[in-house]
């Protein structure tokens, strides 16, 4: 289709900067594209983009308006799909309905997967696992420099299983506890934690929603992601090496606080690992969606919770020599504590961009990025864009475009989308959360001061990936 220069510029700028936020209809382009209508130059198309831009502007101003980010995108999703339905001829209403249902099913699969992971994290938190780790680190009387590296390394590895937000909050609690007398240490350590948590999530399918999406889509195998371990480590180590010399050499005041985990904490951690193995096994050997394994793992936790409750009821007959108290456990309370605002925001983004994909913007954006720009430049640019826009909708957009690129390029965009958010404090959930947790100490501008060092790590990780994984390109 021929577009005027004006329309091309408009589509590229809005399509890349706005439709990158969402999830058009994945396989829909392959199964029902013959029935879709191109609405990219229609009033409905421009209206849909306008609605989404406005909704995302409200999302980005959440700190000012105190409006939960899920609300505007859920509302925008309804408006966008309504506009699409009105724009289609009455005789093709079923096409729109099928497209919506397809996007809804894609969301449901990811939502259930994440819900189980969040439930396990909440269960571990309730059993005081993370508080016990923090207490242990504080008691060991490490120097500030040692704590800088310990919290960074722990952030890198913990975030490969837990989400980067939970990991960053845990490690930030540690540095706040020991760095009360050194704001400079807290500031630099928070930056290091954000970089490490984002990097650690890039080399494991469970480490970030973006890697999870790529794995569940079947584009990369479970163990393929571990090819990014060295590049991700480089992304963390390079800026950390620069920041190392800015950390004070003194030691924080000692602490004698002791926190013991509740009964069942270690077994819940073991069940979480078993759940991950179940999900991987079901996907690799039975060729079923990983969410089936995760939901099976949810049952593991449910049965164990029932056991803990029975043990609590009859606690007088049990030995009190176990670590922690035998306290009741309700798995559904852990479900209730899941980050529902995030999950519902996820729904809004998926459906909004699903609508934009149905309109036809993804096909145009894919052509510009991966045909005209080239995959390497496009994937690096996508990583830079994730410093401003959340990496989840960006990866959704790439998956929706489904470009014909090599395994190495898929690994590259997975890496850049995961670590690009470290360039700015607002580029990831971890950074935004730590600005609130360490308010006044870790700020946007204090992070910006170290952006050049983080950018060096970003570039180095890309070069390392292109070198050690050259065979995959």
Image: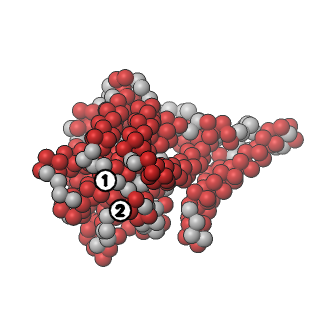
Q: Is residue 328 left or right of residue 108?
A: right
Q: Quadrant of residue 146?
A: top left
In the rendered view, would you say 73 is above or below 217?
above
- Number of labelled discs? 2
- Assess disc 2: are there few (<14), some (14-19) or many (≥20) residues with their C-alpha within 10 Å of its C-alpha: some
Residue at figure coordinates x 31%, y 53% from the top left:
38
Disc 1 designates what residue? 38
Residue 420 in percent (x, y) is at 29, 50
Disc 2 designates what residue? 402
- SS for dot 1: loop
In the rendered view, would you say 275 is above or below 85?
below
Q: Is residue 81 left or right of residue 324?
A: left
Q: Quadrant of residue 213?
A: bottom left
Q: Is residue 202 visible?
A: no
Q: Could you tell me which quadrant the C terminus lies in?
A: bottom left
Observer-nearest of 223 and 229 = 223
- SS for dot 2: loop
Which numbered mark, 2 or 1, is in the foreground of this view? 1
- Assess disc 1: are there few (<14), some (14-19) or many (≥20) residues with their C-alpha within 10 Å of its C-alpha: some
Question: What separation in Å lies between label 2 and label 1 (alpha carbons)?
Answer: 18 Å
Residue 182 in percent (x, y) is at 34, 30
Give residue 429's mark.
none
Residue 241 in percent (x, y) is at 27, 51
Q: Could you tell me which quadrant the N terminus lies in?
A: bottom left
Q: Residue furthest top?
A: 65
Q: Residue furthest right?
A: 317
Q: Earlier in the sequence, mark 2 or mark 1?
A: 1
Residue at figure coordinates x 63%, y 54% from the top left:
295
Residue 219 in percent (x, y) is at 42, 66
In the rendered view, would you say 376 is above or below 434?
below
Residue at figure coordinates x 53%, y 37% from the top left:
340
Observer-nearest of 225 and 108 = 108
């Amino acid at each position: 289709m021929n577009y005027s220069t004006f329309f091309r510029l408009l589509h590229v700028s809005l399509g890349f900067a706005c439709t990158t936020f969402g999830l058009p209809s994945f396989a829909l382009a392959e199964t029902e594209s013959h029935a879709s209508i191109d609405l990219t130059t229609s009033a409905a198309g421009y209206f849909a983009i306008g609605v989404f831009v406005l909704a995302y502007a409200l999302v980005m101003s959440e700190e000012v308006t105190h409006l939960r980010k899920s609300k505007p995108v859920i509302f925008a999703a309804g408006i966008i799909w309504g506009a699409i339905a009105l724009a289609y001829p009455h005789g093709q209403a079923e096409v729109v309905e099928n497209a919506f249902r397809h996007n809804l099913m894609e969301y449901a699969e990811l939502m259930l997967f994440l819900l189980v992971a969040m439930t396990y994290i909440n269960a571990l938190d309730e059993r005081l696992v993370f508080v016990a780790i923090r207490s242990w680190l504080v008691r060991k009387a490490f120097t500030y420099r040692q704590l800088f590296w310990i919290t960074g390394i722990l952030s890198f590895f913990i975030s490969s299983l837990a989400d980067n937000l939970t990991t960053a909050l845990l490690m930030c609690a540690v540095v706040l506890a020991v760095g009360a007398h050194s704001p400079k240490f807290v500031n630099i350590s928070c930056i290091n934690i954000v970089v490490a948590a984002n990097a650690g999530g890039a080399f494991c399918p469970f480490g970030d929603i973006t890697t999870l999406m790529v794995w569940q889509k079947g584009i990369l195998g479970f163990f393929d992601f571990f090819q990014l371990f060295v590049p991700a480590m480089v992304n963390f180590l390079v800026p950390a090496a620069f920041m190392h010399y800015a950390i004070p050499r003194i030691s924080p005041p000692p602490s004698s606080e002791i926190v013991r985990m509740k009964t069942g904490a270690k077994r819940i951690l073991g069940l979480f690992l078993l759940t991950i193995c179940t999900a991987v096994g079901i996907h690799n050997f039975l060729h079923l969606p990983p969410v089936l394994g995760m939901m099976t793992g949810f049952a593991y936790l449910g049965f164990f919770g029932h056991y803990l409750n029975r043990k609590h009821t009859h606690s007088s007959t049990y030995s009190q020599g176990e670590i922690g108290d035998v306290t009741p456990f309700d798995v559904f309370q852990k479900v209730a504590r899941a980050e529902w605002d995030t999950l519902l925001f996820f729904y809004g983004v998926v459906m909004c961009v699903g609508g934009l994909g149905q309109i036809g913007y993804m096909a145009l954006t894919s052509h510009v990025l991966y045909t005209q720009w080239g995959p390497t430049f496009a994937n690096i640019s996508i990583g830079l864009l994730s410093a401003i826009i959340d990496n989840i909708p960006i990866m959704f957009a790439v998956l929706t475009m489904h470009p014909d690129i090599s395994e190495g390029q898929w690994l590259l965009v997975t890496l850049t989308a995961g670590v690009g958010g470290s360039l700015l404090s607002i580029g990831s959930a971890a950074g935004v959360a730590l600005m609130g947790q360490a308010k006044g100490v870790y700020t946007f501008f204090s992070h910006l001061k170290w952006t050049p060092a983080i950018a060096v790590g970003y570039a180095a990780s890309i070069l390392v990936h292109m070198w050690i994984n050259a065979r995959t390109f």
